Amino acid sequence: MSYFRAAVDATTGYIPGEQPKPGTKIIKLNTNENPYPPSPHAIEVLRNIDSEWLRRYPDPYAQDFCLAVSEVLEIPTDWIIVSNGSDELLNVIIRACAEGSDRPVVYPMPTYVLYRTLTSLQPAEAIEINYPQDFQLPTDQLVAAKGAVTFIASPNSPSGHIVPLDDLRELATRLSGVLVIDEAYVDFAEYSALTLVKEFDNVIILRTMSKGYSLAGLRLGFGIANPQLLSGLFKVKDSYNIDAIATLVGAAAMRDRIYKNECAEKIKQSRAKLAIDLKNLSFTVRPSQGNFLLATPPKGNAESLYLKLKEQGILVRYFKQTGLEDKLRITVGTEQQNQTLLEALVQLLA
Ligand SMILES: *Cc1c(COP(=O)(O)O)cnc(C)c1O
C-alpha cells in the first residue's frame, strides 16, 4: 500500500526550470525572470522592514498591496484577491471549482504545464485541447469540453501569442464555468483583457509580480474578479497566504509604474532585436508578446543545442513535449546576455 493517494502517485510533479544559486556565474534565460533589478522603492521598503511586522501574523487580505493595485489599475479593492505567487491562485481556483469528470479543468495546449500538474493532484479531470498550428483559439472545442474552469494564458507560454479580446469575449459568453485569463506576461504585451472582468461575472484575470516587476523570489500574485466570484476563492485559500514582507515590498513595486514600464520597454526592444538576430542565424522565431521567444534552430537539433549551451553556462528552456521537441524557449535577457547567447550560438551552429 502506498502512503499517498492514487492521484499523487500518478503525478510526475512539476519540473521547474533549473535554479542555480544566486551568484553562480550563469546566464539564466530559462524561466522568464526579468533581467533587471526590482524597483529601487521596493528595495528601500525591504531595507526598512520593522521587526514588529515579523512578530505579528500578516494581514490575511494583504490590504496594503490591494490598495496599491486598486490605485494603479483603478479597480475597487474588493475585486482583488492576493496570493503567494499566481501559482497559488491557480491551485485555489482548481480546488474551489473543479471535481471529477462533471466539473473538469479545460485548457488549450501547449500552455503553462502547471495547469496539468495542479489538476492531476486534485480529484478532477483535465481536458486538453490542442491549439491549431496558427494558434487561433479553438473556441468550439473549449466550449464543448464544458469546463468548470477554463484556463487561457494570454500572452501564452511557450508560444508567445496573445489571444484577441473578441475571442476571449466570445468564450466568456459561451462558457457556463469560470474563465481564468492568466496574464503573467501582460507587462510585455500590447493589451490586457482586464475590461472583461466588468463585462462577465465568470471571468477572473490573474497577474503576477514575478515577471514584469522582477519579484519572482518574493512570491506575489493576484486575481481580479467580481466579489461574488472571489468569495468562494477566499474560503479555500490559506488564511495567511501572503507574508508581511511581500505585502509591503509588493505595494511599493506596484506603485512604481514608471520604473516597471522602463524595464518592460527595454525588454520589448531587446526582444525585437534578439528575434532579428536569431532569424539571421536561420532560426524560425514566433512573434512574441512575452519576455521570451519560441525559436526553432536551423538543423532541428534543439535538445543538443540546449545541452551545449548549458555546458557553456547559458540556460534556456527545452520542453520534451509533442510539438516542442524541435524548439527552444529563450527568455529575453539584458543586451549583454543576449549578445553572449548569440555569440555562443554562432560558434555552435558553425
Ligand atoms: C510565470 C507564470 C506564472 C506564475 O507566476 P508566479 O506568480 O511566479 O507563481 C503563471 N502563469 C504563467 C503562464 C506563467 O508563465
Image (cartoon, rainbow, N blue to C red):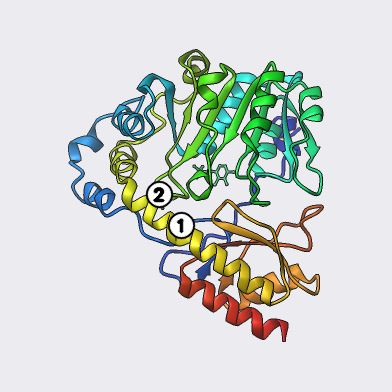
The quarter of the rendering in which ligand 1 is drawn is: top right
Q: Is residue 309 above or below residue 252?
A: below
Q: Are marks 1 and 2 in contact (CB under 8 Å)?
A: yes
| Residue 25 seen by the camera | no
Measuring from the top left, give residue 339's x and y in whole percent: 53, 77
Q: Is residue 82 above or below residue 136?
A: above
| Beta carbon of the mark 1 residue lies under 8 A of ligand 1 | no
Type of the residue with mark 1: Asn
- The tag earlier along the polypeptide, 1 or 2, is 1
Residue at left offset 43%, top offset 21%? 79
Of residues 109 and 160, which is closer to you in this image?
A: 160
User: What element does badge 1 sit on?
Assistant: loop
Residue 92, picture quadrant:
top right
Residue at left offset 53%, top offset 41%? 191
Q: On residue 213, which mark appears?
A: 2
Residue 178, picture quadrant:
top right
Type of the residue with mark 2: Tyr
Tell how many labels.
2
Measuring from the top left, give residue 179's x and y in whole percent: 63, 25
Of residues 62 and 188, which is closer to you in this image?
A: 188
Dividing the image into 4 quarters, which one contains the N terminus?
A: top right
Instruction: List the residue tagged with mark 1.
Output: 34
Measuring from the top left, give residue 185's x and y in whole percent: 53, 46
